[in-house]
């Protein structure tokens, strides 16, 4: 009779154990079925799996529950201590795990080493950050053209995160803009601001920053430009992504969160190890559509090279987008006028606008032969002229076009930015504009 009761009891325990195991298996299955779409989702799943694993171990271990609990606390405490030490180094700014693990996310500016969060600017370069890397154009990357180790790019930033060879306390000319002014494929001595400084015989501060739009450039001027007490401010307006950057800026600010958490999160071990797990092992898949957007460029030595264009170069710009992009420029002009600073807008054209009608450029495909340049320069010029008082401007297109017409490539073949000679041509155009008396009667700075 006793044996029968014990057997029934054992059977009941086995059924309970199997049912419990089924519940845990179902829990793991749910975790797997939910998939992993973000880094935070991955971390949630890892933590859930860890706790489920200990729960299963406690249910089926033959040791007392008190000993199992002790092991759980010791193991978890050790892991937490190691994590606190590793992440504490981030809080103390002793380590940046982005530099150790690399960036595996496209379109996320803060996933790249050497960048820090800024509530207004969204992100900016670390003070005195330096790096060296093999050249790879942005279009070339999309076409899966590998980096060229023979062409290494060395970049260094000043204390404020801008491309100046030394920290500046004052500058006679301040230049603001985006990646065309930062020139992250251009050596220091070939930068547009270095060239302009040589031509003008004056100190020039480069406050260009890749990825910035008009609202951010206005903030750069106020926070970093005006304290340098310049006599002239040159605002470089790029007809490409300056419009989309202006339209998306407010939304990005609302989604940006707070300063210390963003800085910690993107530099942290947790995020960067998780991002590493998201790295795709698939081989690069070229964007075949870009292969249709190419031309043959005949240079001064009668050699032909293939140049590629970005698919967004001829997108239509609405009046709303144009006015939103120009509003910070008008505000900057007012602030400069109040400080008796000469203000000049330099229009930076897309590659297609410069190359589209040159006799030494032959378009290779029907797709790009259907392209037409927009009327953005004329519309922009009209708004600047109608401003009260009119805002002085210079279109860099003719200078870049003249150099390219003579067989000097002014744009990189597999990138949307300028060559060294393109920087030179643009600097000369700005220099000549500054030599002229402004529309408001302000003489060239002495």
Image: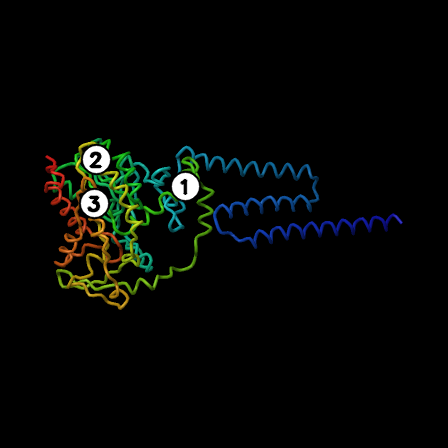
Q: Position of residue 414 (x, y in %)?
A: 26, 57
Task: Classify mark 3: residues with Cα within 10 Å, few (<14), some (14-19) or many (20+).
Answer: some
Q: Position of residue 122 (x, y in %)?
A: 36, 41
Q: Position of residue 178 (x, y in %)?
A: 27, 45
Task: Classify mark 1: residues with Cα within 10 Å, few (<14), some (14-19) or many (20+).
Answer: few
Element type at mark 1: helix
Given contact means CB atoms under 8 Å apart, are the residues at marks 1 and 2 in contact? Answer: no
Given contact means CB atoms under 8 Å apart, are the residues at marks 3 and 2 in contact? Answer: no
Quadrant in the picture for residue 115? top left
Give the spatial CA distance, label 1 vs label 2: 28 Å
Quadrant in the picture for residue 262? top left
Instruction: Please tell me the numbered disc located at residue 58.
Output: none
Tell which of 203 and 52 is nearer to you.
203
| Residue that badge 3 annotates | 384
Q: Residue at x 10, y 42 (%)?
A: 436
Return the disc, 3 or 2, that comes first in the chain's sequence. 2
Give the spatial CA distance, label 3 vs label 2: 15 Å
Return the disc, 1 or 2, that comes first in the chain's sequence. 1
Tell which of 245 and 26 is nearer to you.
245
Q: Position of residue 217 (x, y in %)?
A: 28, 41
Instruction: Please tell me the numbered disc located at residue 254.
Output: 1
Q: Residue at x 68, y 37 (%)?
A: 66
Return the disc, 1 or 3, that comes first in the chain's sequence. 1
Instruction: Tell me the quadrant of the picture where the C terminus can be found.
Output: top left
Instruction: Please tell me the numbered disc located at residue 336.
Output: 2
Q: Residue at x 44, y 45 (%)?
A: 272
């Amino acid at each position: 009779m006793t044996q029968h009761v014990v057997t029934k009891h054992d059977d009941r325990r086995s059924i309970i154990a199997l049912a419990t195991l089924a519940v845990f298996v179902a829990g793991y299955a749910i975790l797997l079925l939910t998939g992993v779409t973000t880094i935070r989702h991955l971390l949630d799943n890892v933590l859930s799996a860890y706790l489920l694993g200990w729960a299963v171990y406690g249910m089926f271990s033959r040791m007392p529950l008190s000993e199992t609990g002790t092991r759980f606390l010791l193991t978890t405490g050790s892991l937490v201590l190691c994590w606190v030490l590793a992440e504490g180094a981030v809080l103390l700014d002793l380590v940046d795990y982005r530099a150790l693990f690399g960036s595996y996310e496209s379109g996320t500016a803060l996933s790249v080493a050497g960048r820090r969060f800024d509530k207004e600017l969204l992100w900016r370069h670390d003070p005195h950050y330096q790096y060296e890397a093999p050249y790879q154009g942005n279009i070339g990357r999309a076409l899966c053209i590998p980096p060229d180790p023979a062409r290494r790019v060395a970049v260094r930033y000043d204390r404020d995160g801008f491309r100046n060879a030394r920290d500046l306390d004052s500058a006679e000319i301040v230049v603001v803009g985006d990646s065309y002014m930062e020139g992250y494929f251009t050596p220091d001595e070939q930068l547009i601001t270095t060239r302009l400084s040589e031509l003008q015989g004056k100190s020039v501060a480069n406050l260009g920053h890749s990825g910035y739009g008009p609202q951010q450039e206005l903030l750069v001027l106020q926070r970093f430009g005006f304290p340098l007490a310049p006599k002239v401010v040159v605002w470089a307006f790029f007809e490409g992504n300056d419009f989309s950057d202006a339209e998306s800026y407010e939304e990005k600010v609302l989604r940006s969160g707070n300063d210390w958490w963003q800085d910690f999160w993107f530099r942290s071990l947790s995020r960067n190890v998780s991002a590493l797990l998201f790295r795709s092992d698939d081989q690069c898949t070229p964007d075949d559509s870009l292969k249709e957007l190419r031309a043959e460029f005949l240079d001064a030595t009668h050699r032909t090279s293939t140049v590629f264009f970005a698919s967004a170069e001829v997108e239509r710009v609405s009046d709303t987008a144009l006015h939103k992009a120009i509003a910070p420029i008008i505000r900057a002009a007012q602030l400069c006028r109040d400080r008796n600073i000469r203000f000049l807008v330099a229009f930076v054209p897309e590659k297609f606008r410069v190359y589209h009608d040159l006799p030494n450029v032959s378009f290779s495909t029907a797709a790009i032969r259907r392209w037409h340049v927009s009327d953005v320069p004329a519309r922009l010029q009209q708004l600047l002229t109608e401003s009260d008082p009119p805002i002085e401007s210079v279109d860099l297109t003719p200078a870049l076009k003249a150099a390219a017409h003579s067989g000097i490539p002014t744009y990189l073949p597999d990138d949307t930015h300028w060559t060294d000679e393109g920087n030179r041509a643009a600097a000369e155009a700005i220099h000549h504009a500054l030599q002229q008396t402004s529309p408001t009667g302000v003489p060239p700075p002495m």
